Amino acid sequence: MKFYMPTVVYEENEAVWNHRRELAALGTKALIMTGRSSAKANGSLDDVTKALDDQGIGYTIFSEVEENPSVETVERAAVQGRRDKADFVIGIGGGSPMDAAKAAAFLIKHKNKGAGDLYDASLDPAAVPVAEVPTTCGTGSEVTGVSVLTRNNGTKKGSIPHKIFADIALIDGKYIMNAPLSIIRNTAVDALGHLLESGLNSARNEYSLMLVLEGLKYWKRIWQVVEGTKVLDQYAAEDLMHASALAGMAIAQTGTSVPHGLSYTLTCELGMPHGAAVGYYLGSYLKEAEKEDDVLTREFLKCAGFTSAHDFEFFFEKVCETGEVPKETRQKAYDTLVSDEKRLATASYKIDTEMLKRIARI
């Protein structure tokens, strides 16, 4: 049985300032990677630059990471980092900047490589040091080795083959206090997807199940915030970030499963937020699990605050409001997965083509 967790996690109020010395110890100059505006708005960028200034560490800022970042964006960030002689990377934001930061750290290490090399599994996976500062409560990228990027002009989305874990993660619930409810909902559903896909996974073990059950306990405490019937306060924000981190640790052991595999088509084709795209297929995945892997499925749903897969679907439709996905898009999602034996084998129960059709909602 294996448990792999190389990232040092600091989860507390003022985590960045409190651990500025550990942050500064990663190198002599940082490449800070963010989205276009949210890191400035929520104060996380100011916290990081203040901490670096206090420690006499220089930095260069790349603030052009888009949602579902492209390999070209990662290459441009790495070029800037090399030009400015950055020897470590700090990702600030949701999954997009954090995933992009890990990939840029890989390219900075491999000086002669570019966007076309990110998916070359034969390359040494070494990267310069990475710190992550999450500002959403869903991806768990701060504690996983995964970097999900888009390529082929945004038509294909998937993880690079190199596992790049952050050296440190600095988690502070204050960064989501003023986030729009839609962001809270989509990212929280993503975290729930991570927990349930890790739990209903052929690679699960006692350690990953421990993380799943603990994460679901915290997720249950915040579902009223996600629903919109309770106001987000400091304690709920901390619970959201904690559930997200535990979910990330869980999938770091097992990986995700079929809902994530299907979700990428919805994101690429329709621009649907990642968490909502995962949630769109999570209910149908759970319905099959209720029949095939019933004991743990019932336990997981109960821990999360749901009575059944149908109960989750009702909740999801209320909070994410995706509407009906066009049949041709659902068919395309099915087509991308039906021959992916590796992805289908991640489920804790055997999925044949007829079952996959039901999960894919066609």
Image (cartoon, rainbow, N blue to C red):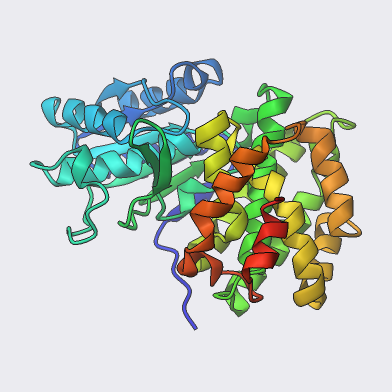
Q: Is residue 80 above or below residue 110?
A: above
Q: Give the x, y percent position of residue 92.
A: 44, 32
Quadrant for residue 12, please give it. top right
Residue 324 at least partly seen:
yes
Q: Is residue 244 above or below residue 4?
A: above
Quadrant for residue 273, please give it. top right
Q: Give the x, y percent position of residue 226.
A: 79, 36
Q: Give the x, y percent position of residue 350.
A: 64, 76
Answer with left or right where residue 77 lies relative to residue 278. left
Q: Tell me the residue at 13%/42% (across/down).
A: 113
Of all residues, the one furthest to the left in this rendering is 112
Q: Is residue 126 above or below residue 182?
A: below
Instruction: Please name whichever residue, 235 or 245, is drawn nearer the observer in this view of the structure.
Output: 245
Instruction: Please name whichever residue, 257 or 127, is drawn nearer the observer in this view of the structure.
Output: 257
Q: Tell me the residue at 25%/46% (across/down).
A: 118
Answer with left or right where residue 94 lies relative to residue 186. left
Residue 21 at least partly seen:
no
Q: Give the x, y percent position of residue 70.
A: 35, 33
Q: Tell me the residue at 43%/43% (across/down).
A: 157
Instruction: Please name whichever residue, 290 or 143, is drawn nearer the observer in this view of the structure.
Output: 290
Count of labels in the image: 0
Answer with left or right where residue 270 lies relative to residue 64. right
Answer with left or right where residue 1 lies relative to residue 71. right
